[in-house]
Amino acid sequence: NKVVDVQDGIPGISGLQHITTDAKGYRVTPPVDYQASNTLRIFTIGGSTTEDIYLDDKKTWSYRLQETLTDLLGTRVEVVNTGVSGLRIRHHLATAQQVIQYHPDMLIFMIGLNDWNHHIHSHFLDQPEETSKRKRFYFRETRLSQLTIRTAKIVFRQLAAESSPLAANGENETSGFSVNRGNYYTKQRGSLDRKIRHTFRPDNVYPNFNKYLMKISSLCQENNIPCVFVTQATGYQPNSSEEFKAGFWMTPPNVDYTLDFESMIYIARLYNDHLMRFAHQQKHIACDIGKDMPPSYDLFYDECHFNTKGAARVGDLIADCVDHYFLATGDSP
């Protein structure tokens, strides 16, 4: 429960933003009685582009979706935002498995961004074959391994907390008020100009991406829950301006190299197209919002994350997909 005064550095977001989560860590407004089942309850699942960490509770795309669907469907809708920055497809499966107990009427997945960054990182990671074989044999099979792994997890959690956008701006996530001037982003922008530049155009998505998509699909089908798969809108589009591209930092993030812009266009399209084909083939709801999100600071504050106006647009676009589903199926909420 905190108030962030966004003063600068995050285009399209400014002023006081009231940001809360409930006891489960989910962003919900108003509070949800998870044991009740007398409303249309939707869970949104994804990473930072779902979490909307710098947006006020009533400005996130999940809240906009909730209010728009309530008007369109003529019934009270609850949208529970479970998004957490950095999560990938295997984590989204775990989240879906967890929320099944809370009577979801629909699950909405906005996925792909963190998985394609993981794909890029994995491709360029320098791990000589013989070294990795020795590590697997001599480390993981020792009695010391489990203690070391547990210790490493504690360290990694602490490092992750210290490197989060909030911490990078000197914020304590449990404090009541803070000022944000976008320091986490401004110091990383201009990633397309990194000296080391690679071209990367894989033939297919990372193998685990499709593996876990199929597991999510099975979960949806086995529990008879309509599932919506939403593409990740980005600035990786041929019509992005030079000014907008200068603000990019995720090409990919947290490394000393960059992919060329054409490779970023390619890999974003690869994952989004794969997601849409998968949704159609498995008879889920495919919601391609990217084509309706022009690349500029009008809707994004960087190449992937939505500002206030962008989140409102995303909420309305997804509401349109959900409304069309109910109209097409006659499955009245």
Image (tube, grey):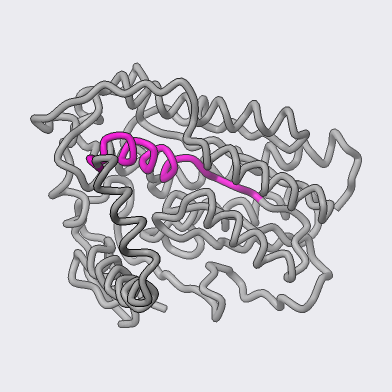
How far across and how far down the image is residue 315, in percent?
57, 46
Is 109 within the magenta?
Answer: yes
Position of 172 with respect to 326 (left or right) is left
- Image-quadrant location for residue 14: bottom left
Residue 160 spot, x, y in % from top left = 29, 66
Label the magenta part by its dominant secondary structure. Answer: helix
Residue 258, above or below 323 = above
- Image point 52% across, 44% down: which residue? 111
User: What's the residue at 31%, 44% (across, down)?
Assistant: 301
Residue 258 position by quadrant: top left
Quadrant location of the N terminus? bottom left
Q: How many marks?
A: 0
Asked which quadrant contains residue 130, the reply is top left
Eyeballing the image, is 142 above or below 261?
A: below
Is 165 or 253 nearer to us in this picture? 253
Q: Is residue 295 above or below residue 320?
A: above
Residue 259 spot, x, y in % from top left: 25, 28
Q: Residue at x 16, y 46 (%)?
A: 188
Q: Range of the magenta residues?
A: 108-127
Is residue 257 found inside the magenta-colored segment of the image?
no
